Amino acid sequence: MTLYKNIDSNKNRSALLLGLFFVIVVALGYLFSLVYHSYIILYIAIIISFIQALVSYYSGDKIALSISGAQQIEKKDNPALWNIVENLAITGGLPMPKVYVIPDDAPNAFATGRDPEHASVAVTTGLLNRLDKNELQGVIAHELSHIGNYDIRLSTIVVVLVGVIALLSNIFLRSRFFGFGGRDNKDSGGGQLQLILLIVAIVAAILAPIAATLIQLAISRKREFLADSSGALLTRYPEGLASALEKISQYTQPVRKVSGATAHLYISDPMGKKVSYFQKIFSTHPSIAERVKLLRGMSV
């Protein structure tokens, strides 16, 4: 498979998964509206999520960098790193992002920012100490590809949709638990139908957030594959990133300052090595072995 075909394939799959998100949001909102005979819950959830989205969109990068303990550097602080970022940004037709270094022995990196004009790239000291120039170029190209592919914007949309689904489900389940709800319609002979509808709504409220989280993680994994392909295309040397990923995978300790909200940003799962099948399902990243295999099977 060529790099271009792999990029197109991952874009299409991400679009399908994102579309499935919208279907879940609309279906869940409509189902709850039938039970309550009102769209007020849906409206409230969307308003709250919209406010959260604005905060995440305009301040999410600052929050992520602060959580990770990243320190901004200038060219004089690390000329080698700065030149790699600058040269690859020029090659990719991107503005020069801000450059950060995270004092952590775990080799890892991430990119953040709402668009190429407001982007940052952060790498750990462990990454700088373990990788050679070609490998570091592969990692930086991967992160710049996240910026160029607008993955951060996609992630924001997905997070908002997950928030809507979780909020809708939470409000519905709490309202039923405390005895609030819609009319039973017993007088109109619709009691049995209303009961069935209520049971379906409760099951949906429990399962929908789980399904939404799984879709979110699937999109995150697809975007990693896409960034691998785009990064290899940028350097014209897939082996550099493949070799870097192998070195990164050999270090199994987690990044010290990381949270579940920022884990998906990193090039490799910062939470540590996943061992069980169940853990892999709920991982923000595909396996390193699979990524390396695809990179080495690609032709530029």
Image (cartoon, helix red, strand yellow):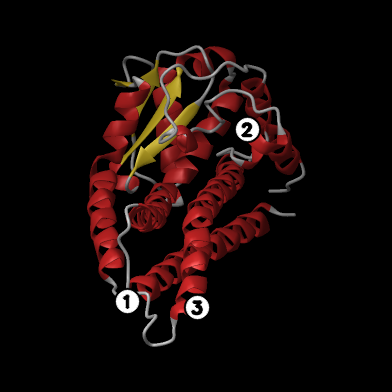
The quadrant holding residue 273 is top right
Q: Specify few, some or many for label 3: CA neighbours under 10 Å numbering under 14, 14-19, or 20 or more.
A: few
Of the image marks 2 and 1, the number of the one nearer the N terminus? 1
Q: Amino acid at mark 3?
A: Gln
Looking at the image, residue 23 sits to the left or right of residue 233; the answer is left
Of the image marks 3 and 2, the number of the one nearer the N terminus? 3
Can you give x and y, in whole percent of width and height, for residue 133 in the image? 56, 22
Tag in front: 2 or 1: 1
Q: CA distance from mark 1 to mark 3?
A: 16 Å
Can you give x and y, in whole percent of width and height, for residue 201 in the image? 47, 65
The residue singled out by tag 3 in the image is 192
Can you give x and y, in whole percent of width and height, for residue 162 in the image? 42, 53
Mark 3 residue element: helix
Mark 1 residue element: loop
Looking at the image, residue 49 sits to the left or right of residue 193; the answer is left
The quadrant holding residue 194 is bottom left
Tag in front: 3 or 2: 3
* Picture residue at 73% right of the left edge, 34% below the top: 289
User: In this picture, is 14 found above or below 60?
Assistant: below
Q: Amino acid at mark 2?
A: Leu
Q: Nearer the viewer, residue 227 or 66?
A: 66
The residue singled out by tag 2 in the image is 241
Which of the image's four quarters has the N terminus?
bottom right
User: In this picture, is 270 found above or below 116?
Assistant: above
